[in-house]
Amino acid sequence: MNGEEITDPDTARGIIRIRLGHYLYQRLASIAHERGERIVDIAFDMLEDAVMDAERRR
C-alpha cells in the first residue's frame, strides 16, 4: 500500500474496490455538479441504463 507488494488476493481486491469506488464517486459528483442534479439520481439512471443494455444483449 505504501510501496509494499501486496500478495494477498483479498487485500488486493479490497484496495481495488475502494479506489474504484472513490473514482466513480468523484466522476458522479462532477457530473452532478455540471448538471445541477443529485448524485444518487444520476447513479440510479446509469444503473437503470446498464440493466436495460444488458437485457437487450441477452
Image (cartoon, rainbow, N blue to C red):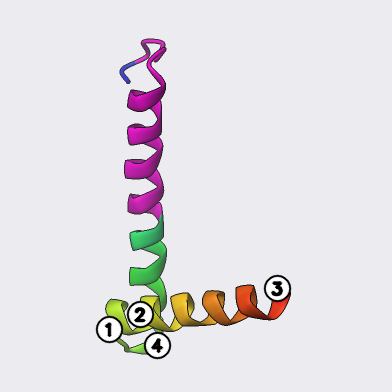
Distance between mark 2 and mark 3 Cα atoms: 31 Å
Q: What residue is pinned by disc 3?
A: 58
Residue 51 location in percent, x, y? 53, 76
Distance between mark 2 and mark 1 Cα atoms: 6 Å
Q: Is 9 covered by the magenta stretch?
A: yes
Instruction: Give the structural element (helix, strand or loop) at label 3.
Output: loop
- Circle 2/circle 1 CB separation < 8 Å: yes
- Tag in front: 4 or 1: 1
* Amino acid type at image mark 4: Arg
Q: Is residue 39 left or right of residue 24?
A: left
* Amino acid type at image mark 3: Arg
Identify the residue at image location x=40%, y=33%.
Answer: 13
* Amino acid type at image mark 1: Arg
Examine the image and state in which quarter residue 25 appears: bottom left
Q: Depth check: give the residue in front, 12 or 52.
A: 52
Residue 35 location in percent, x, y? 40, 87
Examine the image and state in which quarter residue 28 appears: bottom left
Q: What residue is pinned by disc 1?
A: 38
Identify the residue at image location x=39%, y=26%.
Answer: 12
> Which segment did they paint magenta?
3-23
- Tag in front: 3 or 1: 3
Q: Depth check: give the residue in front, 46 or 22.
A: 46
* Amino acid type at image mark 2: Ala
Q: What residue is pinned by disc 2?
A: 32
Q: Depth check: give the residue in front, 38 or 6.
A: 6
Distance between mark 3 and mark 1 Cα atoms: 31 Å
Identify the residue at image location x=33%, y=25%.
Answer: 11
User: Magenta region, mostly helix, strand or loop?
Assistant: helix
